[in-house]
Image (cartoon, rainbow, N blue to C red):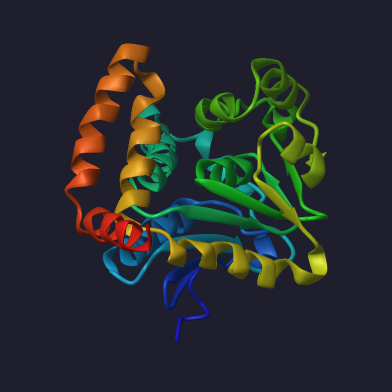
Amino acid sequence: MPDENKVVLYTNEGSIGRITLNRPEKRNALNYEVIAGIAGALREAEGDERTRAIVITGSGKDFCSGADLSALEKTSEASVAENMEDARSLMELFLSIRKVRVPVVAAVRGRALAGGCGLASACDIVLASNSARFGYPEVKIGFVPAIVMAILRRNVSEKRAFELITLGEEIGAEEAKQIGLINRVFKDETFDQEVTDYVDRFDKTSKSAVSLTKKLLYQIDGLAFTEALETGVDVNVIARMTDDSRQGIARFLQKH
Protein backbone atom coordinates (compact mmCIF):
# COMPACT_ATOMS: atom_id res chain seq x y z
CA MET A 1 0.00 0.00 0.00
CA PRO A 2 1.29 3.51 -0.83
CA ASP A 3 2.11 5.91 2.01
CA GLU A 4 -0.78 8.40 1.95
CA ASN A 5 1.48 11.03 3.56
CA LYS A 6 3.74 11.15 0.51
CA VAL A 7 3.38 14.09 -1.88
CA VAL A 8 3.53 11.67 -4.82
CA LEU A 9 1.91 8.23 -4.73
CA TYR A 10 2.75 5.31 -7.00
CA THR A 11 0.70 2.17 -7.51
CA ASN A 12 0.88 -0.61 -10.07
CA GLU A 13 -2.31 -2.03 -11.54
CA GLY A 14 -1.06 -4.84 -13.73
CA SER A 15 0.13 -3.20 -16.93
CA ILE A 16 -0.65 0.35 -15.75
CA GLY A 17 1.61 2.38 -13.47
CA ARG A 18 -0.33 5.15 -11.72
CA ILE A 19 1.41 8.27 -10.42
CA THR A 20 -0.75 10.56 -8.27
CA LEU A 21 0.23 14.05 -7.17
CA ASN A 22 -0.90 14.06 -3.55
CA ARG A 23 -1.11 17.64 -2.30
CA PRO A 24 -4.84 18.32 -2.70
CA GLU A 25 -4.76 21.10 -0.10
CA LYS A 26 -2.21 22.91 -2.32
CA ARG A 27 -3.99 22.00 -5.58
CA ASN A 28 -1.07 19.61 -6.19
CA ALA A 29 1.35 22.50 -6.66
CA LEU A 30 4.86 21.68 -7.80
CA ASN A 31 7.90 21.98 -5.58
CA TYR A 32 11.24 20.19 -5.54
CA GLU A 33 9.84 17.28 -3.52
CA VAL A 34 6.92 16.73 -5.91
CA ILE A 35 9.13 16.92 -9.01
CA ALA A 36 11.59 14.46 -7.46
CA GLY A 37 8.70 12.19 -6.48
CA ILE A 38 7.31 12.10 -10.02
CA ALA A 39 10.77 11.38 -11.44
CA GLY A 40 11.28 8.53 -8.96
CA ALA A 41 7.86 7.05 -9.72
CA LEU A 42 8.60 7.15 -13.45
CA ARG A 43 11.79 5.17 -12.87
CA GLU A 44 9.94 2.63 -10.72
CA ALA A 45 7.17 2.20 -13.30
CA GLU A 46 9.58 1.81 -16.18
CA GLY A 47 11.63 -0.70 -14.22
CA ASP A 48 8.62 -3.02 -13.98
CA GLU A 49 8.49 -5.20 -17.10
CA ARG A 50 4.70 -5.51 -16.76
CA THR A 51 4.20 -1.77 -17.35
CA ARG A 52 2.66 -0.91 -20.72
CA ALA A 53 1.62 2.67 -19.87
CA ILE A 54 1.96 5.21 -17.07
CA VAL A 55 -0.88 7.50 -15.94
CA ILE A 56 -0.18 10.77 -14.10
CA THR A 57 -3.09 12.34 -12.25
CA GLY A 58 -3.83 14.58 -9.27
CA SER A 59 -5.68 13.89 -6.04
CA GLY A 60 -8.58 16.12 -5.07
CA LYS A 61 -10.27 18.58 -7.42
CA ASP A 62 -7.30 19.68 -9.53
CA PHE A 63 -4.54 18.10 -11.60
CA CYS A 64 -1.83 20.65 -10.79
CA SER A 65 -1.90 24.41 -10.23
CA GLY A 66 1.74 25.00 -11.18
CA ALA A 67 4.60 26.10 -8.95
CA ASP A 68 4.06 26.25 -5.20
CA LEU A 69 3.65 29.93 -4.26
CA SER A 70 5.71 29.52 -1.09
CA ALA A 71 8.52 28.07 -3.21
CA LEU A 72 8.17 30.90 -5.73
CA GLU A 73 8.47 33.44 -2.92
CA LYS A 74 11.94 32.14 -2.13
CA THR A 75 13.21 32.51 -5.71
CA SER A 76 13.66 36.28 -5.44
CA GLU A 77 16.12 35.76 -2.59
CA ALA A 78 17.88 32.72 -4.06
CA SER A 79 21.20 32.86 -5.87
CA VAL A 80 21.55 32.38 -9.62
CA ALA A 81 22.94 28.88 -9.01
CA GLU A 82 20.03 27.95 -6.74
CA ASN A 83 17.45 29.24 -9.22
CA MET A 84 19.22 27.42 -12.04
CA GLU A 85 19.16 24.12 -10.14
CA ASP A 86 15.46 24.56 -9.35
CA ALA A 87 14.54 25.38 -12.95
CA ARG A 88 16.61 22.50 -14.32
CA SER A 89 14.79 19.99 -12.10
CA LEU A 90 11.56 20.71 -14.01
CA MET A 91 13.36 20.60 -17.34
CA GLU A 92 14.89 17.23 -16.47
CA LEU A 93 11.46 15.89 -15.48
CA PHE A 94 10.01 16.86 -18.87
CA LEU A 95 12.97 15.21 -20.60
CA SER A 96 12.59 12.04 -18.56
CA ILE A 97 8.92 11.74 -19.58
CA ARG A 98 10.02 11.67 -23.21
CA LYS A 99 12.77 9.16 -22.50
CA VAL A 100 10.52 6.69 -20.66
CA ARG A 101 10.04 3.76 -23.02
CA VAL A 102 6.28 3.39 -22.49
CA PRO A 103 3.51 5.95 -23.14
CA VAL A 104 2.99 8.47 -20.34
CA VAL A 105 -0.61 9.66 -20.11
CA ALA A 106 -1.86 12.73 -18.22
CA ALA A 107 -5.36 12.28 -16.80
CA VAL A 108 -6.56 15.80 -16.05
CA ARG A 109 -9.44 16.66 -13.76
CA GLY A 110 -10.00 20.25 -12.69
CA ARG A 111 -7.28 22.78 -13.39
CA ALA A 112 -3.91 22.23 -15.06
CA LEU A 113 -2.24 25.64 -14.90
CA ALA A 114 1.25 27.07 -15.54
CA GLY A 115 3.81 24.36 -14.76
CA GLY A 116 0.88 22.00 -14.19
CA CYS A 117 -0.29 22.60 -17.74
CA GLY A 118 3.30 22.09 -18.82
CA LEU A 119 3.45 18.79 -16.93
CA ALA A 120 0.28 17.58 -18.64
CA SER A 121 1.44 18.61 -22.12
CA ALA A 122 4.87 17.06 -21.50
CA CYS A 123 3.13 13.68 -21.38
CA ASP A 124 2.72 11.71 -24.59
CA ILE A 125 -1.08 11.76 -24.36
CA VAL A 126 -3.45 14.09 -22.47
CA LEU A 127 -6.92 12.92 -21.47
CA ALA A 128 -9.22 15.46 -19.81
CA SER A 129 -12.54 15.49 -18.03
CA ASN A 130 -15.20 17.69 -19.57
CA SER A 131 -14.86 20.38 -16.88
CA ALA A 132 -11.04 20.51 -16.93
CA ARG A 133 -9.32 23.87 -17.42
CA PHE A 134 -5.92 24.64 -18.95
CA GLY A 135 -3.80 27.78 -18.99
CA TYR A 136 -0.47 29.57 -18.62
CA PRO A 137 -1.16 32.50 -16.24
CA GLU A 138 2.51 33.22 -15.47
CA VAL A 139 2.53 36.63 -17.18
CA LYS A 140 -0.08 37.88 -14.71
CA ILE A 141 2.51 37.75 -11.93
CA GLY A 142 5.42 38.95 -14.03
CA PHE A 143 6.76 35.46 -14.65
CA VAL A 144 7.58 33.74 -17.95
CA PRO A 145 6.30 30.26 -18.95
CA ALA A 146 9.82 29.59 -20.17
CA ILE A 147 10.43 25.86 -19.77
CA VAL A 148 6.90 24.79 -20.73
CA MET A 149 7.06 26.93 -23.88
CA ALA A 150 9.29 24.43 -25.70
CA ILE A 151 6.53 21.83 -25.35
CA LEU A 152 3.59 24.15 -26.01
CA ARG A 153 5.22 25.37 -29.24
CA ARG A 154 5.35 21.77 -30.46
CA ASN A 155 1.73 21.05 -29.54
CA VAL A 156 -0.17 23.99 -31.02
CA SER A 157 0.25 26.61 -33.74
CA GLU A 158 2.50 29.61 -33.19
CA LYS A 159 -0.48 31.98 -33.11
CA ARG A 160 -2.38 30.00 -30.49
CA ALA A 161 0.77 29.51 -28.42
CA PHE A 162 1.40 33.27 -28.43
CA GLU A 163 -2.16 33.95 -27.36
CA LEU A 164 -2.07 31.44 -24.52
CA ILE A 165 1.23 32.58 -23.02
CA THR A 166 0.78 36.35 -23.36
CA LEU A 167 -2.86 36.71 -22.26
CA GLY A 168 -2.58 34.09 -19.53
CA GLU A 169 -6.25 33.14 -19.83
CA GLU A 170 -7.72 29.71 -19.09
CA ILE A 171 -9.42 27.60 -21.72
CA GLY A 172 -11.79 24.66 -21.38
CA ALA A 173 -11.16 21.06 -22.32
CA GLU A 174 -13.06 21.17 -25.61
CA GLU A 175 -11.12 24.21 -26.82
CA ALA A 176 -7.86 22.62 -25.67
CA LYS A 177 -8.73 19.59 -27.80
CA GLN A 178 -9.61 21.73 -30.83
CA ILE A 179 -6.21 23.46 -30.82
CA GLY A 180 -4.27 20.23 -30.31
CA LEU A 181 -3.18 20.77 -26.71
CA ILE A 182 -4.91 17.59 -25.54
CA ASN A 183 -6.06 14.33 -27.13
CA ARG A 184 -9.46 13.36 -25.75
CA VAL A 185 -12.26 14.73 -23.57
CA PHE A 186 -14.32 12.35 -21.43
CA LYS A 187 -17.43 12.95 -19.34
CA ASP A 188 -16.79 13.97 -15.73
CA GLU A 189 -18.95 11.20 -14.29
CA THR A 190 -17.27 8.38 -16.26
CA PHE A 191 -13.78 9.87 -16.48
CA ASP A 192 -11.83 7.36 -14.37
CA GLN A 193 -13.27 4.33 -16.15
CA GLU A 194 -12.80 5.87 -19.60
CA VAL A 195 -9.17 6.66 -18.81
CA THR A 196 -8.61 3.06 -17.73
CA ASP A 197 -10.35 1.72 -20.84
CA TYR A 198 -8.24 4.01 -23.05
CA VAL A 199 -4.92 3.05 -21.46
CA ASP A 200 -5.80 -0.65 -21.48
CA ARG A 201 -5.65 -0.46 -25.28
CA PHE A 202 -1.85 -0.50 -25.04
CA ASP A 203 -2.14 -4.11 -23.88
CA LYS A 204 -3.09 -4.96 -27.46
CA THR A 205 0.05 -3.40 -28.94
CA SER A 206 3.67 -4.52 -29.08
CA LYS A 207 5.62 -2.99 -26.21
CA SER A 208 8.87 -2.97 -28.19
CA ALA A 209 7.19 -1.40 -31.24
CA VAL A 210 5.54 1.32 -29.16
CA SER A 211 8.87 2.04 -27.44
CA LEU A 212 10.75 2.34 -30.74
CA THR A 213 7.94 4.45 -32.21
CA LYS A 214 7.94 6.87 -29.28
CA LYS A 215 11.72 7.28 -29.39
CA LEU A 216 11.73 7.86 -33.16
CA LEU A 217 8.87 10.37 -33.08
CA TYR A 218 10.70 12.62 -30.66
CA GLN A 219 14.13 11.96 -32.15
CA ILE A 220 13.15 13.30 -35.59
CA ASP A 221 11.71 16.48 -34.07
CA GLY A 222 14.81 18.56 -34.78
CA LEU A 223 16.11 16.70 -37.82
CA ALA A 224 16.07 17.76 -41.45
CA PHE A 225 13.83 15.72 -43.75
CA THR A 226 16.59 13.51 -45.18
CA GLU A 227 18.09 12.88 -41.74
CA ALA A 228 14.65 11.96 -40.41
CA LEU A 229 14.21 9.43 -43.21
CA GLU A 230 17.66 7.96 -42.58
CA THR A 231 16.87 7.62 -38.88
CA GLY A 232 13.61 5.93 -39.86
CA VAL A 233 15.56 3.40 -41.91
CA ASP A 234 17.71 2.53 -38.88
CA VAL A 235 14.69 2.05 -36.63
CA ASN A 236 12.91 0.05 -39.35
CA VAL A 237 15.80 -2.41 -39.41
CA ILE A 238 15.89 -2.66 -35.61
CA ALA A 239 12.13 -3.27 -35.47
CA ARG A 240 12.34 -6.12 -37.98
CA MET A 241 14.75 -7.96 -35.69
CA THR A 242 12.65 -7.82 -32.50
CA ASP A 243 10.83 -10.88 -31.18
CA ASP A 244 7.50 -9.04 -31.31
CA SER A 245 7.96 -8.29 -35.02
CA ARG A 246 8.97 -11.83 -35.92
CA GLN A 247 6.05 -13.31 -34.00
CA GLY A 248 3.62 -10.73 -35.36
CA ILE A 249 4.65 -11.38 -38.97
CA ALA A 250 4.35 -15.14 -38.41
CA ARG A 251 0.80 -14.74 -37.06
CA PHE A 252 -0.13 -12.47 -39.97
CA LEU A 253 1.18 -14.96 -42.56
CA GLN A 254 -0.69 -17.84 -40.89
CA LYS A 255 -3.96 -15.93 -41.23
CA HIS A 256 -3.34 -15.16 -44.88
What residue is rendered at 39% in x and 27% in y? 80
**Would residue 118 be visible to someone looking at this image?**
yes
* Image position of 8 with respect to 104: above or below: below
Figure quadrant of residue 50: bottom left
Spot occupied by residue 11 in the image (x, y as percentages of width and height)? 45, 76
41 horizontally vs 63: left or right: left
What residue is rendered at 50% in x and 26% in y? 150
Spot occupied by residue 165 in the image (x, y as percentages of width and height)? 69, 25
* Image position of 191 with respect to 213: above or below: below
Quadrant containing the N terminus is bottom left
Q: Please tell me which residue lies in front, 114 or 80.
A: 114
Q: Residue furthest front?
A: 256
Q: Give the mark count.
A: 0
**Would residue 224 be visible to someone looking at this image?**
no
Q: Residue furthest left?
A: 241
8 horizontally vs 251: left or right: right
63 horizontally vs 51: left or right: right
What residue is rendered at 33% in x and 40% in y? 215
Quadrant containing the C terminus is bottom left
Spot occupied by residue 119 in the image (x, y as percentages of width and height)? 54, 45
Q: Please tell me which residue lies in front, 163 or 251.
A: 251
Spot occupied by residue 33 in the image (x, y as percentages of width and height)? 44, 58
Q: Residue furthest bottom?
A: 1
Figure quadrant of residue 187: bottom right
* Image position of 101 with respect to 215: above or below: below
* Image position of 68 with respect to 205: above or below: above
23 horizontally vs 184: left or right: left
